[in-house]
Amino acid sequence: MKKKFISTLLCVAMTASLVVGCGSKADDKKESSDGKTTLTFWCHENEPWVKSYKKVAEKFEKENPDYKVVVKDYPYKVYNDKIQTALTSKTAGPDIIAVWGGNAPAFIESDSLSEVPESMAKELDEDYLAPTTGIYKKEGTYYGVPMEFNLEYGGMIVNKKLFDKAGIAYPKTWDELRSVSKQVSKMNGDVSEMKGFEMIDTDALICNYLAMILQQGGQYLEEDDSINFATPEGIKAMNEIVSMVKDGECDLENLTAGEYCYNDVYKDKGYMSSVGSWAIGEGTDTYSLTYGKDFEYVQVPQYGEKMAFASETGWGLMVPKNSANQDMAWKFIEFFSNPDNLVEHNIACNQLPPRKSLLDSEKYKEAMPNISFLLDILPDGQWMGPYNTSDMRDIFNEMFIDLCQSDKTDVEGALKEASQKITEKCKISYSME
């Protein structure tokens, strides 16, 4: 599964990083039994991803026969704690770590990471799309290299069987989307028996909301990077989303349960669900459905006059300061990030490429025809901002649930309060510039 699995472990890790001192670099390089220097690559359990990491490692070893790359994967529920412990150890731990962007600030703040070499930093500035690098910078210095463009806006899973049975075409405009959503949704009292268009879960809700603000020509980030949702564009977008729930097109079930809306579509309980392209694999693998027969992945109709959206920084690679092989670890990351190798990894993992130079990749488009339309909108995205987006979501979701469940109509007041809370509690403590 593509998802991030963000949890309270981040808060624990951030606290630990402030309490425990940084580890010192080990003097002795790790050697395997055959005399080769070993590079240890840590990642979390994800079968296609781990398989791809190992494939890149094998290619690297062929070009660098004196080195051996050992890929070790761990369950995500313990992975971040293991990283934090390794970073603060006085002995050498992993040489390369795969990190989710939402967790990166805790590790960067600990000052226990090696800086990205100057040559690679230049590539990050010149050839990587802005949302992919945002979180990896502290005071003008990069500490991580992106592996993907994380996108939770732009595409939706549609239940082809339900659309075909109803004789309805997929909506192409926002007005058509709302019209179809109202037409096909069905309530039985307070219970939703069939859902129309869904975007009410922990990922899709805030990402679609921010896109709706930006597509109207608005902005939610002030010049000082504080949050302000209570703009005319923000108020209009929030009223629109709340109306989806109150009109019976969808409900709060997935948001309150911590589940994803696409499950309803795959279970024939919903027509459309906004979600990242990673969910295609859930349909084919988890639900054993056939793409093109049971479901398809199509573009979410644009809300405003211009294409715009906000995105978090996704998965990337980092090197601990206490690695005994820092230079070679960065050489491996440079090899991994080579466009020819990176595009193969993105294809293998159903990821979107982070590099501008890969947006026209015919190899990618041929291998990923179902999501290649997303490549066209990637340059229109902005970084979500210098925030702990997990905590940001919690505050935003709580506000949204209150708006939907209460008789209060003070949307502007609710947005002002949420903006203030997020700015005060979720903003990253250090400067990016």
Image: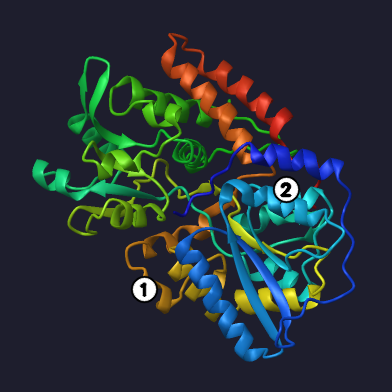
Residue placed under numbered mark 1 in the picture: 367
Q: Is residue 124 left or right of residue 377?
A: right
Disc on res. 93: none
Give whichever of discs 1 and 2 has the lower sequence position. Answer: 2
Q: Give the CA separation, mark 1 to mark 2.
A: 33 Å
Q: Quadrant of residue 57?
A: bottom right
Q: Is residue 175 above or below residue 277?
A: above
Residue that extends furthest to the front in the rendered view of this protein:
33
Q: Nearer the viewer, residue 409 or 193?
A: 193
Q: Quadrant of residue 420?
A: top right
Residue 213, percent from left and from top: 51, 37
| Residue occupying the point 18% across, 31% down | 183
Disc on res. 105: 2
Q: Secondary structure at mark 1?
A: helix
Q: Can residue 91 be spotted in the picture?
A: yes
Q: Which quarter shows the N terminus?
A: bottom left
The colour scheme applied to this rendered structure is rainbow
| Residue occupying the point 39% across, 41% down | 303
Q: Can residue 358 be spotted in the picture?
A: no
Q: Is residue 198 left or right of residue 335?
A: left
| Residue occupying the point 56% across, 18% down | 414
Q: Is residue 317 above or below residue 181?
A: below
Q: Secondary structure at mark 2?
A: helix
Residue 211, percent from left and from top: 49, 42
Amino acid type for the residue under numbered disc 2: Pro
Residue 22, percent from left and from top: 87, 53
| Mark 2 Cα shell of 10 Å, populated few (<14), some (14-19), many (≥20) | many
Amino acid type for the residue under numbered disc 1: Ala
Q: Is residue 231 left or right of residue 15?
A: left
